[in-house]
Image: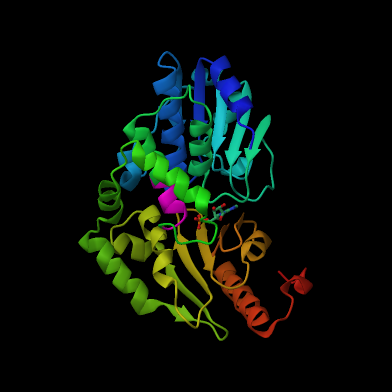
Amino acid sequence: MNFDILLQKIKEYDKIAIFGHTRPDGDCYGSLNGLKNIILTTFPKKRVFCLTSHVESLSFLGKMDSIEDQEFEGALAIVCDTSTRERICDQRYKLCSEIIKVDHHIIIDNYGDYNIVDEDIAATSLLISKFFFKYPELKITEKGATALYTGIMTDTSNFRYRGVNLETFVLAGKLMELGVDVEYIDQQLSVESIRTTKLKAYIYKTLEVTEHGVVYAKLNKRIIKKFNVSNEEAATYVSLLSNIKECPVWILFIEYPKEIRIRVRSNGPDINMLAEAYGGGGHQKAAGASVKNWSKTKSFIKEANYLVKCYKENIPYENRKGRV
Ligand code: AMP
Protein backbone atom coordinates (compact mmCIF):
# COMPACT_ATOMS: atom_id res chain seq x y z
CA MET A 1 0.00 0.00 0.00
CA ASN A 2 1.44 3.36 -1.01
CA PHE A 3 0.89 6.07 1.62
CA ASP A 4 3.24 8.65 0.09
CA ILE A 5 0.40 10.78 -1.28
CA LEU A 6 -1.26 10.87 2.16
CA LEU A 7 1.91 12.14 3.82
CA GLN A 8 2.58 14.58 0.98
CA LYS A 9 -0.93 16.08 1.17
CA ILE A 10 -0.88 16.27 4.98
CA LYS A 11 2.35 18.27 4.69
CA GLU A 12 0.87 20.48 1.95
CA TYR A 13 -2.28 21.61 3.82
CA ASP A 14 -2.51 23.72 6.98
CA LYS A 15 -6.14 22.79 7.58
CA ILE A 16 -7.25 19.16 7.56
CA ALA A 17 -10.77 17.86 8.14
CA ILE A 18 -11.03 14.15 8.93
CA PHE A 19 -14.47 12.70 8.21
CA GLY A 20 -16.02 9.42 9.33
CA HIS A 21 -19.23 7.64 8.46
CA THR A 22 -22.73 8.02 9.81
CA ARG A 23 -23.39 5.95 12.93
CA PRO A 24 -19.71 5.73 13.82
CA ASP A 25 -18.30 2.57 15.34
CA GLY A 26 -15.04 1.84 17.15
CA ASP A 27 -12.99 1.67 13.96
CA CYS A 28 -14.40 4.98 12.76
CA TYR A 29 -13.60 6.71 16.07
CA GLY A 30 -10.25 4.92 16.26
CA SER A 31 -9.06 5.88 12.78
CA LEU A 32 -10.26 9.50 13.04
CA ASN A 33 -8.78 10.16 16.48
CA GLY A 34 -5.63 8.16 15.73
CA LEU A 35 -4.95 10.09 12.53
CA LYS A 36 -5.74 13.45 14.16
CA ASN A 37 -3.30 12.60 16.94
CA ILE A 38 -0.54 11.64 14.47
CA ILE A 39 -0.95 14.88 12.50
CA LEU A 40 -1.10 17.18 15.53
CA THR A 41 1.75 15.46 17.38
CA THR A 42 3.98 15.61 14.31
CA PHE A 43 2.87 19.00 12.96
CA PRO A 44 1.57 20.99 15.99
CA LYS A 45 0.90 24.14 13.94
CA LYS A 46 -1.69 22.51 11.69
CA ARG A 47 -5.41 22.77 12.38
CA VAL A 48 -7.13 19.38 12.37
CA PHE A 49 -10.82 18.62 12.86
CA CYS A 50 -12.60 15.31 13.40
CA LEU A 51 -16.13 15.04 12.07
CA THR A 52 -18.72 12.43 12.83
CA SER A 53 -21.53 12.15 15.35
CA HIS A 54 -20.91 11.93 19.07
CA VAL A 55 -20.97 8.46 20.61
CA GLU A 56 -20.78 8.59 24.39
CA SER A 57 -19.32 5.10 24.82
CA LEU A 58 -16.43 5.93 22.45
CA SER A 59 -15.77 9.47 23.64
CA PHE A 60 -12.82 8.22 25.75
CA LEU A 61 -10.95 8.14 22.41
CA GLY A 62 -11.55 11.83 21.73
CA LYS A 63 -14.30 14.36 21.10
CA MET A 64 -15.68 15.33 17.72
CA ASP A 65 -15.33 18.93 16.48
CA SER A 66 -18.08 21.36 15.60
CA ILE A 67 -17.03 23.76 12.84
CA GLU A 68 -18.47 26.45 10.57
CA ASP A 69 -18.80 26.06 6.79
CA GLN A 70 -16.02 28.56 6.01
CA GLU A 71 -13.49 26.39 7.86
CA PHE A 72 -13.66 23.84 5.04
CA GLU A 73 -12.42 26.35 2.45
CA GLY A 74 -8.88 25.50 1.42
CA ALA A 75 -8.86 22.41 3.65
CA LEU A 76 -7.83 18.85 2.85
CA ALA A 77 -10.55 16.25 3.47
CA ILE A 78 -9.46 12.80 4.63
CA VAL A 79 -12.42 10.43 4.78
CA CYS A 80 -11.82 7.31 6.85
CA ASP A 81 -13.66 3.97 7.01
CA THR A 82 -16.48 5.08 4.66
CA SER A 83 -17.20 3.04 1.55
CA THR A 84 -19.65 5.36 -0.25
CA ARG A 85 -20.07 9.13 -0.45
CA GLU A 86 -23.65 8.93 0.90
CA ARG A 87 -22.35 7.42 4.15
CA ILE A 88 -19.94 10.30 4.84
CA CYS A 89 -21.22 11.82 8.08
CA ASP A 90 -20.96 15.45 7.02
CA GLN A 91 -21.61 16.27 3.37
CA ARG A 92 -19.58 19.46 3.72
CA TYR A 93 -16.57 17.34 2.74
CA LYS A 94 -17.48 18.64 -0.75
CA LEU A 95 -16.37 22.15 0.29
CA CYS A 96 -12.78 20.97 0.80
CA SER A 97 -10.11 21.48 -1.88
CA GLU A 98 -9.09 17.82 -2.20
CA ILE A 99 -10.38 14.51 -0.87
CA ILE A 100 -8.44 11.44 0.20
CA LYS A 101 -10.36 8.26 0.95
CA VAL A 102 -8.76 5.79 3.40
CA ASP A 103 -10.83 2.64 3.75
CA HIS A 104 -10.98 -1.14 4.02
CA HIS A 105 -14.47 -1.88 2.67
CA ILE A 106 -15.27 -3.46 -0.68
CA ILE A 107 -14.77 -0.80 -3.36
CA ILE A 108 -18.04 0.43 -4.84
CA ASP A 109 -17.39 4.18 -4.90
CA ASN A 110 -13.96 5.72 -5.38
CA TYR A 111 -15.11 9.21 -4.39
CA GLY A 112 -11.66 10.51 -3.42
CA ASP A 113 -9.23 12.44 -5.59
CA TYR A 114 -6.86 9.87 -4.10
CA ASN A 115 -8.10 6.50 -2.86
CA ILE A 116 -6.09 4.44 -0.40
CA VAL A 117 -8.18 1.30 -0.02
CA ASP A 118 -7.18 -2.17 1.11
CA GLU A 119 -10.18 -4.51 0.93
CA ASP A 120 -8.26 -7.31 2.63
CA ILE A 121 -7.21 -5.54 5.80
CA ALA A 122 -9.36 -6.02 8.90
CA ALA A 123 -9.76 -2.38 9.97
CA THR A 124 -9.18 1.17 8.77
CA SER A 125 -7.30 1.74 12.05
CA LEU A 126 -4.81 -0.88 10.82
CA LEU A 127 -4.28 1.14 7.64
CA ILE A 128 -3.64 4.29 9.69
CA SER A 129 -1.25 2.28 11.91
CA LYS A 130 0.63 1.05 8.81
CA PHE A 131 0.86 4.64 7.61
CA PHE A 132 2.22 5.72 11.00
CA PHE A 133 4.86 3.00 11.29
CA LYS A 134 6.04 3.45 7.69
CA TYR A 135 7.44 6.95 8.19
CA PRO A 136 9.90 7.41 11.09
CA GLU A 137 9.29 11.19 11.01
CA LEU A 138 5.68 10.69 12.23
CA LYS A 139 4.91 10.96 15.94
CA ILE A 140 1.98 9.75 18.05
CA THR A 141 1.07 9.92 21.74
CA GLU A 142 -0.29 7.14 23.98
CA LYS A 143 -3.80 8.52 23.38
CA GLY A 144 -3.44 8.20 19.60
CA ALA A 145 -2.10 4.66 19.92
CA THR A 146 -5.05 3.82 22.21
CA ALA A 147 -7.49 5.09 19.58
CA LEU A 148 -5.91 2.98 16.84
CA TYR A 149 -5.68 -0.12 19.04
CA THR A 150 -9.37 0.25 19.99
CA GLY A 151 -10.34 0.56 16.32
CA ILE A 152 -8.48 -2.64 15.49
CA MET A 153 -9.86 -4.48 18.50
CA THR A 154 -13.49 -3.53 17.87
CA ASP A 155 -13.53 -4.12 14.10
CA THR A 156 -12.03 -7.59 14.54
CA SER A 157 -14.38 -8.28 17.47
CA ASN A 158 -11.43 -8.84 19.79
CA PHE A 159 -9.21 -10.43 17.13
CA ARG A 160 -11.75 -13.16 16.41
CA TYR A 161 -12.29 -12.88 12.63
CA ARG A 162 -10.41 -14.79 9.91
CA GLY A 163 -9.22 -11.49 8.44
CA VAL A 164 -6.93 -11.28 11.48
CA ASN A 165 -3.37 -12.27 10.54
CA LEU A 166 0.23 -11.85 11.56
CA GLU A 167 0.25 -8.23 10.42
CA THR A 168 -2.77 -7.45 12.64
CA PHE A 169 -0.97 -8.73 15.71
CA VAL A 170 2.34 -7.13 14.77
CA LEU A 171 0.70 -3.71 14.39
CA ALA A 172 -1.42 -4.14 17.54
CA GLY A 173 1.73 -5.24 19.41
CA LYS A 174 3.68 -2.22 18.18
CA LEU A 175 0.86 0.06 19.38
CA MET A 176 0.95 -1.67 22.78
CA GLU A 177 4.64 -0.84 23.02
CA LEU A 178 3.62 2.82 22.78
CA GLY A 179 1.73 2.54 26.07
CA VAL A 180 -1.74 1.18 25.25
CA ASP A 181 -3.50 -0.06 28.39
CA VAL A 182 -5.69 -2.97 27.25
CA GLU A 183 -7.49 -3.24 30.60
CA TYR A 184 -8.48 0.43 30.48
CA ILE A 185 -9.90 -0.02 26.97
CA ASP A 186 -11.79 -3.16 27.98
CA GLN A 187 -13.31 -1.38 30.98
CA GLN A 188 -14.43 1.54 28.81
CA LEU A 189 -16.04 -0.75 26.26
CA SER A 190 -17.59 -3.37 28.56
CA VAL A 191 -19.37 -1.23 31.14
CA GLU A 192 -23.08 -2.11 31.34
CA SER A 193 -26.13 -0.42 32.93
CA ILE A 194 -29.31 -1.95 34.36
CA ARG A 195 -31.24 -0.51 31.39
CA THR A 196 -29.06 -2.22 28.80
CA THR A 197 -28.99 -5.46 30.77
CA LYS A 198 -32.80 -5.47 30.75
CA LEU A 199 -32.84 -4.72 27.02
CA LYS A 200 -30.60 -7.72 26.45
CA ALA A 201 -33.10 -9.87 28.35
CA TYR A 202 -35.90 -8.50 26.13
CA ILE A 203 -33.97 -9.43 22.96
CA TYR A 204 -33.38 -12.99 24.19
CA LYS A 205 -37.05 -13.31 25.15
CA THR A 206 -38.49 -12.07 21.85
CA LEU A 207 -36.06 -13.41 19.23
CA GLU A 208 -37.56 -15.44 16.37
CA VAL A 209 -36.14 -18.12 14.10
CA THR A 210 -37.12 -18.82 10.46
CA GLU A 211 -37.63 -22.25 8.91
CA HIS A 212 -34.08 -22.53 7.53
CA GLY A 213 -32.26 -20.85 10.40
CA VAL A 214 -32.24 -17.06 10.38
CA VAL A 215 -32.52 -15.66 13.89
CA TYR A 216 -33.76 -12.12 14.26
CA ALA A 217 -35.07 -9.60 16.76
CA LYS A 218 -36.94 -6.35 16.28
CA LEU A 219 -36.51 -3.22 18.37
CA ASN A 220 -39.23 -0.71 17.56
CA LYS A 221 -39.43 2.90 18.75
CA ARG A 222 -41.69 2.00 21.69
CA ILE A 223 -39.27 -0.61 23.05
CA ILE A 224 -36.24 1.63 22.58
CA LYS A 225 -38.07 4.35 24.51
CA LYS A 226 -39.23 1.92 27.20
CA PHE A 227 -35.68 0.78 27.95
CA ASN A 228 -34.43 4.36 27.68
CA VAL A 229 -31.51 3.54 25.39
CA SER A 230 -30.24 5.42 22.35
CA ASN A 231 -30.72 3.88 18.92
CA GLU A 232 -26.96 3.44 18.69
CA GLU A 233 -26.85 1.55 21.97
CA ALA A 234 -29.76 -0.65 20.88
CA ALA A 235 -28.02 -1.39 17.58
CA THR A 236 -24.94 -2.78 19.31
CA TYR A 237 -26.90 -5.83 20.47
CA VAL A 238 -26.79 -7.59 17.11
CA SER A 239 -23.96 -9.66 18.58
CA LEU A 240 -26.34 -11.17 21.15
CA LEU A 241 -27.84 -13.22 18.32
CA SER A 242 -24.52 -14.65 17.15
CA ASN A 243 -23.21 -18.20 17.44
CA ILE A 244 -26.52 -20.03 17.67
CA LYS A 245 -25.70 -23.44 16.23
CA GLU A 246 -28.77 -23.73 13.98
CA CYS A 247 -28.61 -20.14 12.72
CA PRO A 248 -25.77 -19.13 10.38
CA VAL A 249 -27.40 -15.73 9.74
CA TRP A 250 -28.60 -13.31 12.40
CA ILE A 251 -30.31 -9.95 12.05
CA LEU A 252 -31.22 -7.08 14.34
CA PHE A 253 -33.80 -4.52 13.17
CA ILE A 254 -33.72 -1.14 14.89
CA GLU A 255 -36.35 1.53 14.30
CA TYR A 256 -34.80 4.99 13.90
CA PRO A 257 -36.98 8.13 13.55
CA LYS A 258 -37.15 7.92 9.75
CA GLU A 259 -36.04 4.41 8.84
CA ILE A 260 -35.52 0.90 10.04
CA ARG A 261 -31.89 -0.02 10.18
CA ILE A 262 -30.96 -3.61 9.41
CA ARG A 263 -27.79 -5.10 10.87
CA VAL A 264 -27.11 -8.53 9.43
CA ARG A 265 -24.30 -10.93 10.26
CA SER A 266 -23.29 -14.40 9.07
CA ASN A 267 -20.90 -17.22 9.82
CA GLY A 268 -22.22 -19.14 6.79
CA PRO A 269 -23.37 -17.62 3.48
CA ASP A 270 -22.12 -14.29 2.17
CA ILE A 271 -24.72 -11.66 2.99
CA ASN A 272 -23.41 -8.51 1.29
CA MET A 273 -25.43 -9.32 -1.85
CA LEU A 274 -28.60 -9.56 0.20
CA ALA A 275 -27.92 -6.17 1.81
CA GLU A 276 -27.10 -4.64 -1.58
CA ALA A 277 -30.44 -5.84 -2.97
CA TYR A 278 -32.06 -3.61 -0.32
CA GLY A 279 -29.93 -0.58 -1.12
CA GLY A 280 -27.33 -1.34 1.54
CA GLY A 281 -23.94 -2.99 1.43
CA GLY A 282 -21.02 -4.16 3.52
CA HIS A 283 -18.74 -7.13 3.96
CA GLN A 284 -19.36 -10.80 3.17
CA LYS A 285 -20.10 -11.63 6.80
CA ALA A 286 -21.21 -8.24 8.20
CA ALA A 287 -23.55 -6.05 6.22
CA GLY A 288 -26.42 -3.64 6.63
CA ALA A 289 -29.20 -1.70 4.97
CA SER A 290 -32.01 0.69 5.83
CA VAL A 291 -35.65 0.28 4.83
CA LYS A 292 -38.61 2.62 5.13
CA ASN A 293 -41.17 0.45 6.94
CA TRP A 294 -41.69 -2.77 8.86
CA SER A 295 -43.34 -4.54 5.92
CA LYS A 296 -40.02 -4.34 4.02
CA THR A 297 -38.33 -6.13 6.91
CA LYS A 298 -40.64 -9.09 6.34
CA SER A 299 -39.40 -9.49 2.78
CA PHE A 300 -35.81 -9.07 4.00
CA ILE A 301 -36.32 -11.93 6.48
CA LYS A 302 -37.86 -14.06 3.71
CA GLU A 303 -34.86 -13.42 1.46
CA ALA A 304 -32.42 -14.16 4.26
CA ASN A 305 -34.28 -17.39 4.94
CA TYR A 306 -33.98 -18.34 1.25
CA LEU A 307 -30.29 -17.45 1.26
CA VAL A 308 -29.71 -19.82 4.17
CA LYS A 309 -31.74 -22.54 2.42
CA CYS A 310 -29.49 -22.11 -0.68
CA TYR A 311 -26.42 -22.28 1.53
CA LYS A 312 -27.54 -25.40 3.36
CA GLU A 313 -28.78 -27.17 0.20
CA ASN A 314 -25.95 -25.97 -2.02
CA ILE A 315 -28.16 -24.02 -4.44
CA PRO A 316 -26.47 -20.99 -6.05
CA TYR A 317 -28.16 -17.88 -4.63
CA GLU A 318 -26.96 -15.69 -7.50
CA ASN A 319 -29.47 -17.43 -9.80
CA ARG A 320 -32.29 -15.58 -8.14
CA LYS A 321 -31.39 -12.18 -9.59
CA GLY A 322 -34.48 -10.02 -10.02
CA ARG A 323 -36.53 -11.60 -7.26
CA VAL A 324 -35.48 -9.07 -4.67
P1 AMP B 1 -23.21 -2.23 10.57
O1 AMP B 1 -24.22 -3.27 10.84
O2 AMP B 1 -23.77 -0.84 10.53
O3 AMP B 1 -21.99 -2.38 11.41
O4 AMP B 1 -22.71 -2.47 9.08
C1 AMP B 1 -21.88 -3.52 8.71
C2 AMP B 1 -21.19 -3.13 7.43
O5 AMP B 1 -22.20 -2.99 6.43
C3 AMP B 1 -20.53 -1.78 7.56
O6 AMP B 1 -19.15 -1.97 7.62
C4 AMP B 1 -20.93 -1.02 6.34
O7 AMP B 1 -19.88 -1.06 5.40
C5 AMP B 1 -22.07 -1.77 5.73
N1 AMP B 1 -23.34 -1.06 5.75
C6 AMP B 1 -24.22 -0.97 6.77
N2 AMP B 1 -25.30 -0.27 6.43
C7 AMP B 1 -25.10 0.14 5.17
C8 AMP B 1 -25.85 0.92 4.24
N3 AMP B 1 -27.06 1.42 4.55
N4 AMP B 1 -25.32 1.13 3.01
C9 AMP B 1 -24.12 0.63 2.67
N5 AMP B 1 -23.36 -0.14 3.50
C10 AMP B 1 -23.83 -0.38 4.73
Work out whether residue 305 or residue 131 is closer to the camera in this orientation and state it: 131
Instruction: Considering the whole magenta stretch, tell me its main secondary structure.
Output: helix
Tell me which residue sits at (64%, 33%) in the image: 2
Work out whether residue 41 or residue 213 is closer to the camera in this orientation and state it: 41
Residue 39 location (% of width, % of height): 45, 24
Say if 234 sits above or below 242 in the image. above
Tell me which residue sits at (55%, 57%) in the image: 163
Coloring scheme used: rainbow
Q: What range of the chain is rendered magenta? A: 150-157
Image quarter where ligand 1 lies: bottom right
Residue 310 location (% of width, % of height): 68, 80
Q: Does the magenta stretch include residue 156?
A: yes
Residue 276 location (% of width, % of height): 66, 59
Residue 117 location (% of width, % of height): 63, 41
Q: Is residue 303 visible?
A: yes
Say if 322 sits above or below 158 in the image. below
Say if 73 sits above or below 311 in the image. above
Q: Does the magenta stretch include residue 133?
A: no
- Report the quarter where the C terminus lies: bottom right
- Left or right: residue 227 compared with residue 213: left
Work out whether residue 156 or residue 270 is closer to the camera in this orientation and state it: 156
Q: In which quarter of the image is residue 275?
A: bottom right
Work out whether residue 221 or residue 2 is closer to the camera in this orientation and state it: 2
Q: Residue furthest left?
A: 194
Tell me which residue sits at (48%, 65%) in the image: 253
